[in-house]
Amino acid sequence: MSHLRSDLRTRAEELVALYPEKRSALIPLCHLAQEQDGWLTPEATSEIAELCGVTAAEVQGTATFYDMLHTEPVGTYAVAVCTNIACLLGGALELLEHAEATLGIRAGGTTPDGVFTLHEAECLADCDKTPCVQVNHRYVGAQTPASFDALVDDLRAGRLSETIPNHGTLVRVRRTVGLLADRDAVKAERAAVSQEQAARAATAAAADGGK
């Protein structure tokens, strides 16, 4: 039985069909699983491995390399405070300390109610708005202690749900053009390519045997 919802399983199979090698879909599938669960559960990891023709250990090893992929539960809202040089000069450490006090957790922790996870981040590439803060990878502009508290209140109350979805959702707009492929057509094309490769290999082997 699939761990992914039926609609996500269909999307996962469509993603795999886009690539000449199934394993190339590994990272997109990880994001798809996070859209459902908010993190990469063991069940999702196993299903991604099956879809990509790799081991669960390979999925886990790949996921742990990327900051946007989580192999342990995170909050509904993952809050990242940049403490790189530009933000550092703009008061990032003071803001991070305030965020820890407001949320009652240290950086790297999750609130007991599971709503917020707080991260200390490297450069978030919004250096003209310091200190830079992201929530679920959405920029929320330069923050002060007062504006951060207001941000937390808005998130708890659901007032920002239109712009900041739950963690794991990268985009809420689905493609209707572009990277679409008929799976049967893709399979037929790949089968033809495989036959051509086999024929060339056989020709080359016969030529080598005749020397």
Image (cartoon, grey):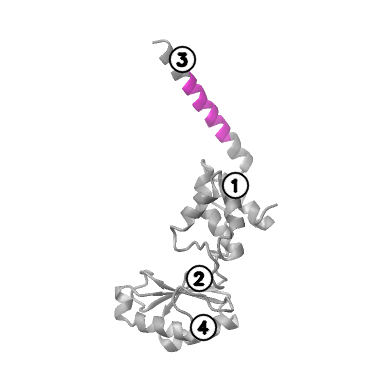
Q: Residue 150: image x %, image y %?
A: 50, 87
Disc on the earlier residue, 2 or 4: 2
Q: Nearer the viewer, mark 1 or mark 3?
A: 1
Label 2: which secondary element: loop
Q: Residue 184: image x %, image y %?
A: 63, 39
Q: Label 1 to label 3, Cα distance in Å?
A: 37 Å
Whether 55 is among the magenta residues is no
Disc on the earlier residue, 1 or 4: 1
Q: Residue at x 55, y 65 (%)?
A: 168
Q: Amino acid at mark 2?
A: Asn
For residue 42, which quarter of the picture?
bottom right
Label ID, residue 152: 4
The boundaries of the magenta stretch are: 189-202
Give the residue number, with chain letter if any, for mark 2. Answer: 136
Q: Amino acid at mark 4?
A: Val
Q: Residue at x 47, y 53 (%)?
A: 61
Give the residue number, with chain letter if any, for mark 3. Answer: 206
Label 4: which secondary element: helix
Q: Amino acid at mark 3?
A: Ala
Disc on the earlier residue, 2 or 3: 2
